[in-house]
Image (spheres, rainbow, N blue to C red):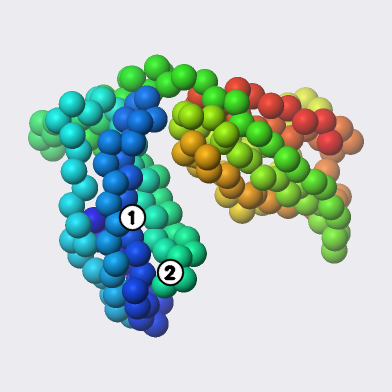
Amino acid sequence: MSVYNDYYKSFKAYKVSAEVFDLNSKRVFTKVQTVDIPEDGVVNDVFKIVFPDNITKVHFIKLRLYDEKGKEVASTFYWRSTDKYEGAKTLTGPATSGFEDLAKLKSVQLKTKYKIREASGSHFIEAEIQNNSSRIAFFTQRQLLDEKGKPVRPSYYNDNFFSLLPGESRKITIETSKSDMPANPVFVVKGWNVKPQTFNL
């Protein structure tokens, strides 16, 4: 695992964490390491992520970076399979094939709180999405739709298509020009294994 910094500023005493979860959302590996990150540079091979021999075929990796005060400043989420790479002319390997078991993910009910505001000619939906379940909410999506179920465009999302670990939450904002807002807009929260929620605005 490596850390890349594209700022012209170095960072001291940052912490890198890695967690691996199996298909049942059970954490099977975790590790934290303190690093000093050079300006406009890379810290290679901070540590090696270990995947247990008996891990489920499909599993998940959560990486986080914390500053010297313990505040999370970056995170990434990956899904991986145990498929072996069979060569350049094949569609094989941990990042390419063997993800059929994602269909076995148990459904998750998310908690959604939102508020609406208008400012400077724009309409804003500010929502907090919480995963209070014991399961990973995989590949969740937010949508602003019109009365016909079509996406309202242009709309600007500060984040979308993300996954939430058990206990995690995410704040998102959707910004749309007031002139582009339909008469009866709908805010939708859904995902791969997320029970759909529809809110009439």
- 131 lies above or below 75: above
| Type of amino acid at the residue the image marks with label 1 | Ser
Q: Is residue 64 left or right of residue 171?
A: left
Circle on res. 17: 1
- Residue 113 appears in the figure: yes
Q: Is residue 85 left or right of residue 179?
A: left
Which quadrant is home to the C terminus?
A: top right
The quarter of the displayed image where residue 4 is located: bottom left
Give the spatial CA distance, label 2 vs label 1: 12 Å
**Residue 59 tag number:** none
Name, please, the residue furthest toward the right: 183
The reply to whether residue 161 is visible in this rendering is no
Q: Which amino acid, mark 2?
A: Asp
Residue located at (40% from left, 77% from top): 7
Task: Report x, y in % for residue 160.
Answer: 57, 44
Indicate the quadrant containing the N terminus: top left, top right, bottom left or bottom right.
bottom left
**Residue at image x 25%, y 25%?**
57
- Is residue 89 shown above or below 104? below
State the residue in front, 144 or 154.
Answer: 144
The outermost residue toward the top is 104
Q: Secondary structure at mark 1?
A: strand
Residue found at x 46% / y 71%: 69
- Label 2 sits on a secondary structure element that is loop
Residue 65 lies, in percent from the top left, at: 39, 61
Q: How dense is the environment of label 1, judged by Cα within 10 Å: few (below 14), some, or many (20 and up)?
A: some
Count residues near mark 2 (Cα–Cα under 10 Å), then give few for <14, some for 14-19, many for 20+. Answer: some
Q: Disc number at residue 67?
A: 2
Q: Quadrant of residue 198?
A: top right
